[in-house]
Amino acid sequence: MTPDRRAVTLGLAGLPLAGCATWQDAAAGQTVWRFGDLDSIAAPLTIEGAPERIEGPTPHGAMRFDGVDDALFIGAHPLAGAATFAFEAVFRPDGGAFEQRWLHLQSDEVVAPGETPVGTRFLFEIRVYGDQWALDTFVKGPTYNQTLLFPEKRHPVGRWYHVAQTCDGTTYRAFVDGELQGEAGIAFTPQGPGRASVGTRINRVNYFNGAIAEARFTRRHLRPDQFTGVRPR
């Protein structure tokens, strides 16, 4: 039985209050979403379920998702048009279902009648093994379709981590707390405009049980020593 949902739509969010860290640095080509401060998300935003604001590893706090029906839907794809990228997040997985998709960027593809969309997207997922988890990142477009999942590289649930996926145009890499999980060569091409979901897949399956403090989207490649997100150790 599908659980009842409560949806709240917040139109275009305003700029953060004075004294808050900058949500967007246009010169650096970077966008930051802080989930403990939804005003940092300058795009149409819909809340489903009842995600809860909690304390987190940054002064802005974090948002807790229950793994059942809590989610955010955002009318923006911050990496659209980027030829290289760094996609970072700070999150806390709390165990639960084996497969959980917690940050999804989807391009809105325009196709001719009778053609099938490619399904161009970026994903952050996890696979849960009891009290441990492994990072699963995925990127797909017209010239690439690549998963980075290494089940032998597991981490304890219930603590905060910095994760990242990057591409320099030819090599796609995934990191946990700055440590390389794996890499693969891809023929990356920029994605088009679109939308995002947080706490679930864009079609409302594989809900996330845990908390997310922030996501950072940089429209250029970064090395691990250049990552700008909080790295809680």
Image (cartoon, rainbow, N blue to C red):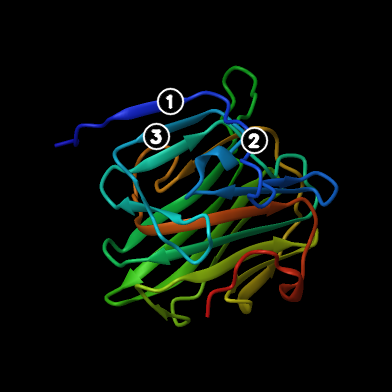
Q: Are marks 1 and 3 in contact (CB under 8 Å)?
A: yes
Residue appearing at x 43%, y 25% in the figure: 9
Say which mark, if any, is on residue 34: none
10 Å crowding of disc 3: few (<14), some (14-19), many (20+): some
**Element class at badge 1:** strand
Measured in 3D between alpha carbons, the distance from the residue under mark 3 to the one under mark 2, in whole angstroms, is 19 Å
Q: Quadrant of residue 220?
A: bottom right
Measured in 3D between alpha carbons, the distance from the residue under mark 1 to the one under mark 3, in whole angstroms, is 6 Å
Mark 1 residue type:
Thr
Nearer the camera: disc 3 or disc 2: 2
Q: Which residue is mark 1?
A: 9
Horizontal and vertical percent position of residue 122: 59, 49
Q: Does 172 sit above or below residue 108?
A: below
Mark 2 residue type:
Leu
Mark 3 residue type:
Ile
- Mark 1 / mark 2, whichever is N-terminal: 1
Residue appearing at x 81%, y 44% in the figure: 26
Image quarter of the N terminus: top left
Say which mark, if any, is on residue 15: 2
Residue appearing at x 38%, y 66% in the figure: 93
**Element class at badge 2:** loop
Q: Does 159 sit above or below residue 89?
A: below
Q: Which residue is mark 3?
A: 47
Along the line of sight, the residue nearer the viewer: 180 or 116: 180
